[in-house]
Image (cartoon, rainbow, N blue to C red):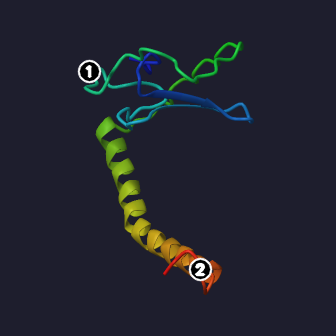
């Protein structure tokens, strides 16, 4: 089954280079942008397109799925390994950014504030 464009969680973005990103916001489509799971438990039909701007151009066709000998489980394992790498580094990056923001806040702080007692 292809990507369900009528799903509430489907998003498509076109960048200035012409590249089109099609994906499930919840990350439930392991084969995105080519297909959604057959019986996706989070599928919800989109009821309204509030706040969306629809262009007059025709959507580009989705390029064909790459031919690969890797099974779905092997691809999931690879993505999980990549996720583990990101999750291992993320806490350090958050802490580093928090220290930078704290230092910036301290340098911008005025010594005397007339509205505080």
- What secondary structure is marked by label 2? loop
The quarter of the image holding the N terminus is: top left
- Left/right placement of residue 82 relative to residue 15 reads left
Q: Residue at x 44, y 16 (%)?
A: 6
- Left/right placement of residue 117 relative to residue 81 reads right
Judging depth in this view, the residue of 17 and 111 nearest the camera is: 111
Q: Nearer the viewer, mark 1 or mark 2?
A: 2
Picture quarter containing residue 106? bottom right
Q: Is residue 23 above or below residue 105?
A: above
Q: Estimate how packed mark 2 is, as few (under 14), some (14 to 19) or many (20 or more) residues with alpha carbons within 10 Å.
A: few
Q: Residue at x 41, y 32 (%)?
A: 31
Q: Estimate how packed mark 1 is, as few (under 14), some (14 to 19) or many (20 or more) residues with alpha carbons within 10 Å.
A: few
Circle nearer the N terminus (1, 2): 1
Picture quarter containing residue 58? top right
Q: Position of residue 107 (x, y in %)?
A: 63, 83
Q: Position of residue 65 (x, y in %)?
A: 50, 27
Badge count:
2
Judging depth in this view, the residue of 54 and 10 nearest the camera is: 54
In the image, which disc is placed on residue 61? none
- Left/right placement of residue 37 relative to residue 23 reads left
| Residue annotated with mark 2 | 113
CA gap, disc 1 to disc 2? 59 Å
- What secondary structure is marked by label 1? loop
| Residue annotated with mark 1 | 39
Q: Position of residue 77 (x, y in %)?
A: 32, 48
Judging depth in this view, the residue of 69 and 26 nearest the camera is: 26
Pick out the residue farthest to the right: 16
Judging depth in this view, the residue of 30 and 7 nearest the camera is: 7
């Amino acid at each position: 089954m292809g990507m369900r464009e009528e799903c509430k969680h489907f998003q498509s973005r076109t960048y200035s280079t012409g590249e089109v990103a099609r994906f499930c916001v919840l990350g439930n489509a392991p084969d995105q942008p080519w297909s959604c799971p057959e019986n996706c438990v989070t599928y919800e039909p989109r009821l309204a397109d509030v706040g969306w701007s629809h262009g007059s151009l025709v959507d580009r066709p989705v390029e064909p799925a790459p031919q690969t000998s890797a099974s779905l489980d092997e691809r999931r394992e690879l993505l999980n390994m990549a996720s583990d790498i990101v999750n291992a580094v993320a806490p350090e990056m958050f802490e580093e950014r928090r220290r930078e923001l704290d230092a910036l806040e301290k340098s911008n702080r005025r010594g005397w504030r007339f509205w505080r007692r």
